[in-house]
Amino acid sequence: MSRCYNIVVVGGGVTGLMAATLLAKGPQRDALNITLVDAAPRPVFSPDDDVALRVSAIATGTAEMFASVGAWEYTAATRVGPYTGMRIWDESDTPESAAALRFNADEFAIQQLGFIVENVLLQDVLLYQLDRSNATLRFASPIGKLRRAARHYELDLESGETLTADLVVGADGARSFVRSAVGIEANEWPYEQTAFVTHLRPEKPHGQTALQRFLRDGPLGILPLQDGRVSIVWSTTPEQAEAAMAAGDAATGHMLSEASDYVLGSLEVAGPKGAFPLCARHATSYVLPNLALIGDAAHAIHPLAGQGANLGLQDAAELAAQITGAVGQGLHPGDRPVLRRYERARKGANATMLHFMTGLNRLFTTDSAVLGELRTAGMRAFNRSGPIREHAVKVALGVG
Ligand SMILES: Cc1cc2nc3c(=O)[nH]c(=O)nc-3n(C[C@H](O)[C@H](O)[C@H](O)COP(=O)(O)OP(=O)(O)OC[C@H]3O[C@@H](n4cnc5c(N)ncnc54)[C@H](O)[C@@H]3O)c2cc1C
C-alpha cells in the first residue's frame, strides 16, 4: 500500500515529538500531513510508576516551548523537580570556595533555573497533544529502506507499508538510520567515558540545587528530584562505570558518596542503574533536498551541562518555524533553500556548544598543574565577569 504524506518524522524521542507537535498544531496544520514513525513501542508514562531512570535538566526557556504547545501545565503538575540553584566546583576545591561557580534563580529574576523531568513524561505530554491533532503515529514500525525518488523520499516499513515524504525529518537519535541511509557523514570525538546513572537518597536535603563536581575521570552531576532523592550522572572511566553497575547497592552508594565528597552526606542507592558510553558526534550536514536532521541525529554532546535535549528541542522549534513560514509563502517544505535556513540558524550554535563542552571536559580531566592553575583562575574570573557570566547563563537557560 502506498500513501502520500507531506512530512514524515522518523523518531519519537523528545525532539521528533516536539517537531511533529509544533507542525501539527501550528498555523499551517491544514496544509501538512504529518506522520511520525518509531521503531520502538509507544512510550507509556504513569504517575503511579517510580521515577524513570532517564531524566533531563530542562532549561526554563525549554519549558516555555512546552507551554506554547499546551504541554507544560500537566508536566508541571505531575512530577517535575524545579532547581533554583547550581554549584559547580573542582575536586581540589569545595562548593563554598571562591573558585566554585554559583548561580541562583533570583539573581536572574526568574523563579527557577530549570526543571528535572523524566524523559518519558516529556514524551507522554507531547503524545497527548499529537493524539488530538491530525498527525498519525506509527510506533513499533521499523524502517526497512529509505530511498530518494524524484522530489521526495520513499520509506519502506518492515510492515510492508510504503510512506512517501516531501520532507523526511530524521530525529532518530545518535546512531541515526536516516543519517547513514542518505550518506551524511558524522565526525566523532569519543570521550573515553561512560555515564553511570542512578537515583540516590541523600542524607542531607538537596535544597533544590543542582550540583556538579569535576573529578579527574569526569564530572559527577547531582540533580534534585521532586521527592527528595537525587538523580546522578557520573561520567567516568568505562571500568569504573562497569564496577558501579556490577557492585551491590551499598558498595555503589559508597562509591558515589566518596565521588561527591559527601556534599549531601552519605548517598544510598534508591533506583535502577544504567550506563551510557559517551561520544561527541556532529553531522557534517544537517540537510539535503527533502530531508533534515534534528536532535541527537545531528549532534550528540557531553551530558555535563545538561544541554543535549535542550539543543535538540531548539532544532525542532527552528525547523518547524522555517517550514511554517515557507508553506505560508507557498513554498515547498522540502526545498533546499528552506532547509538551509534551518541549518544556518542551528549548526553553528550547536557546534559552539559541542566544542565548548568537549573542551570543558578536557580542561577538568587534565592532571597538568599549569592547566589546574588556569582552571581555578578562570573560574574565579568568570565569577567576577558580570555581563559575560550573565550572558553565558542566559544562553544555557534559553532565556533573554
Ligand atoms: C546520561 C545522559 C544524561 C543526559 N542528561 C541530559 C540533561 O540533563 N539535559 C539535556 O538536555 N540532555 C541530556 N542528555 C541528552 C539527551 O538525553 C539527548 O540529547 C536527547 O534525549 C536526544 O533526543 P532525540 O529525540 O534527539 O533522540 P533519542 O531520545 O535518542 O530518540 C530517538 C528515537 O528514534 C527512534 N529510532 C531509532 N532508530 C530508529 C529507526 N531506525 N527507525 C525509527 N525510529 C528509530 C528511537 O526508538 C527513539 O525513540 C543526556 C544524555 C545522557 C546519555
Image (tube, rainbow, N blue to C red):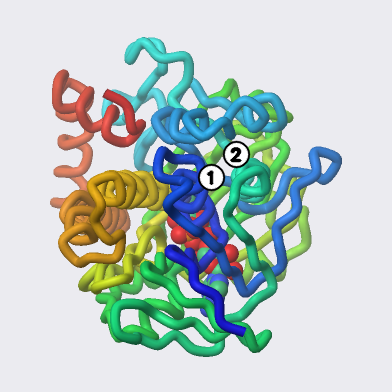
Residue 116 visible at all: yes
The circle on residue 38 is none
Residue 367 visible at all: no
Helix or strand or loop: what does disc 1 sit on?
A: strand
| Residue 242 percent location from the top left of the image | 60, 71
**Disc 2 residue type (three-letter):** Val
257 or 205, which is in the foreground? 205
Q: Is residue 105 above or below residue 298?
A: above
Q: Residue furthest right?
A: 48
122 or 126, which is in the foreground? 126
Helix or strand or loop: what does disc 2 sit on?
A: strand
Q: Is residue 299 above or below residue 147?
A: above
| Residue 380 percent location from the top left of the image | 20, 28
Q: Is residue 167 above or below residue 316?
A: below
The circle on residue 56 is 1
279 or 212, which is in the foreground? 279
Whether ligand 1 has any atom under 8 Å from the Cβ at mark 1 is answered as yes
Question: Which of the 4 image quadrants contains residue 70?
Answer: top right
| Residue 257 percent location from the top left of the image | 61, 44
Residue at position x 52%, y 26% in the image: 83
Q: Upstream in the sequence, badge 2 or badge 1? A: 1
Question: Which of the 4 image quadrants contains residue 110?
Answer: top left
| Left or right, residue 397 beside residue 112 | left
**Residue placed under numbered mark 2 in the picture:** 117
| Residue 165 percent location from the top left of the image | 43, 72
**Disc 1 residue type (three-letter):** Ser
| Left or right, residue 193 beside residue 344 | right
Q: Residues within 10 Å of mark 1 (few under 14, many from 20)?
A: some
Where is the C terminus found, in terms of image quarters? top left
Labels 2 and 1 touching (C-beta < 8 A): yes
| Alpha-carbon span between mark 2 and mark 1 | 5 Å
